[in-house]
């Protein structure tokens, strides 16, 4: 049931922590000097995730982990295994903090080939969230690119307007349209945020929860977004969706 989608908390976005000490599996080598291979990857990753954001060794250890994962990139891209490439890209970006993905942040170069493949292939497939994530990863790793920025903005705007915008005649969207659109738009931006948790993506996702809550709760919706007040559910599924949205929004925002 679609209403159950809003019961999910963004565990994939929690870059939180894992338990670990300065060494694992009996190793006495300092983390800053530890090599990363198939055997040591899990332990080094666990120790990396508990480093403070401003720890001077964090970026070096992060890049070592990403470089190890990238040894699989060429073969997966050559095989055109889209889902495997997306999975590997997700493993890499799970190692990044939002600050790494902010404007002027630090995105490992090893991410670019995967992001380029996902952007090109995902666009042909109509895979909106993954295309958005890949485009933003490329923007963050390549610096200023007006054409790429315009494409990202176009895809993001189209997805929003198609799901939550006014009807063709300019009238506010019906409850049914908003209901279907809300489910779709949240799925898109949850996946976008999972693959590329940049600060503006997380901010946009929390904004969607606030705007949808206002729309379904009879608040003053945004005229530009086409929200109409006092919309009423007409089925049990819709009623459950609205109830879950109103109940979970504060927790969802806190989780993001």
Image: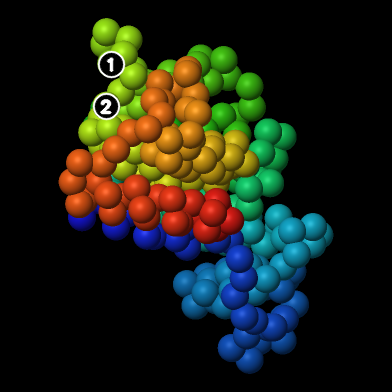
Instruction: Pick the quarter of the image with the N terminus.
Output: bottom left
User: Which callout, 1 or 2, points at the residue further toward the start of the chain?
Assistant: 1
Q: Residue furthest left?
A: 235
Q: Report which quarter residue 35 is drawn in.
A: bottom right
Q: Please give the name of the residue rendered at 59% of the width and 88% of the height, measured from the top-left corner.
A: 25
Considering depth in this image, is 256 or 39 the residue closer to the camera? 256
| Label 2 secondary element | loop
Q: Please give the name of the residue rendered at 72% of the width and 86% of the height, measured from the top-left corner.
A: 28
| Label 1 secondary element | loop
Q: Please give the name of the residue rendered at 61% of the width and 66% of the height, measured from the top-left corner.
A: 16
In the image, residue 116 lies at what x, y percent? Answer: 43, 34
100 on left or right of 192: right
Against 77, residue 71 (above or below) is below
**In the rendered image, is residue 201 in sight?**
no
In the image, residue 171 lies at what x, y percent? Answer: 31, 13
Q: Report which quarter residue 215 is drawn in.
A: top left
Applied colour scheme:
rainbow
Q: Nearer the viewer, mark 1 or mark 2?
A: 2
Considering depth in this image, is 39 or 240 the residue closer to the camera? 240
In the image, residue 39 lies at what x, y percent? Answer: 49, 77
Q: Please give the name of the residue rendered at 72% of the width and 81% of the height, measured from the top-left corner.
A: 22
Considering depth in this image, is 41 or 152 the residue closer to the camera? 152
What numbered label is drawn on residue 167? 1
What numbered label is drawn on residue 63? none
Disc 1 and disc 2 in contact, CB within 8 angstroms = yes
What numbered label is drawn on residue 174? 2
The span from disc 1 to disc 2 (Cα, nearest Å) is 8 Å
**In the rendered image, is residue 186 in sight?**
yes
Exactly how many numbered labels are in the figure? 2
Q: Residues within 10 Å of mark 2 (few under 14, many from 20)?
A: some
Q: Residues within 10 Å of mark 1 (few under 14, many from 20)?
A: some
In the image, residue 81 lies at what x, y percent? Answer: 26, 47
């Amino acid at each position: 049931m679609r209403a159950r989608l809003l019961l999910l908390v963004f565990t994939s976005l929690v870059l939180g922590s894992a338990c670990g000490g300065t060494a694992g599996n009996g190793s006495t080598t300092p983390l800053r000097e530890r090599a990363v291979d198939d055997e040591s990857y899990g332990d080094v990753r666990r120790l990396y995730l508990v480093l403070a954001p401003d720890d001077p060794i964090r970026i070096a250890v992060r890049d070592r982990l990403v470089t190890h994962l990238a040894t699989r990139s060429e073969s997966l891209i050559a095989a055109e295994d889209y889902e495997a490439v997306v999975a590997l890209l997700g493993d890499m970006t799970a190692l990044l903090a939002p600050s790494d993905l902010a404007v002027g942040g630090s995105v490992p170069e090893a991410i670019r080939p995967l992001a380029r493949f996902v952007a090109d292939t995902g666009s042909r497939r109509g895979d909106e969230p993954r295309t958005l994530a890949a485009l933003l990863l490329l923007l963050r790793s390549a610096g200023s690119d007006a054409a790429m920025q315009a494409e990202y903005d176009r895809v993001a705007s189209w997805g929003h307007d198609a799901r939550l915008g006014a009807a063709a005649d300019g009238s506010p969207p019906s409850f049914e349209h908003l209901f279907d659109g809300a489910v779709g738009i949240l799925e898109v931006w949850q996946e976008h945020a999972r693959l590329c948790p940049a600060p503006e993506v997380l901010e946009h996702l929390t904004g969607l929860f606030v705007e949808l809550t206002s729309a379904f709760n009879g608040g003053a919706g945004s005229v530009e977004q086409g929200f109409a007040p006092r919309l009423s559910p007409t089925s049990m599924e819709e009623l459950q969706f609205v109830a879950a949205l109103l109940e979970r929004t504060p927790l969802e925002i806190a989780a993001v």
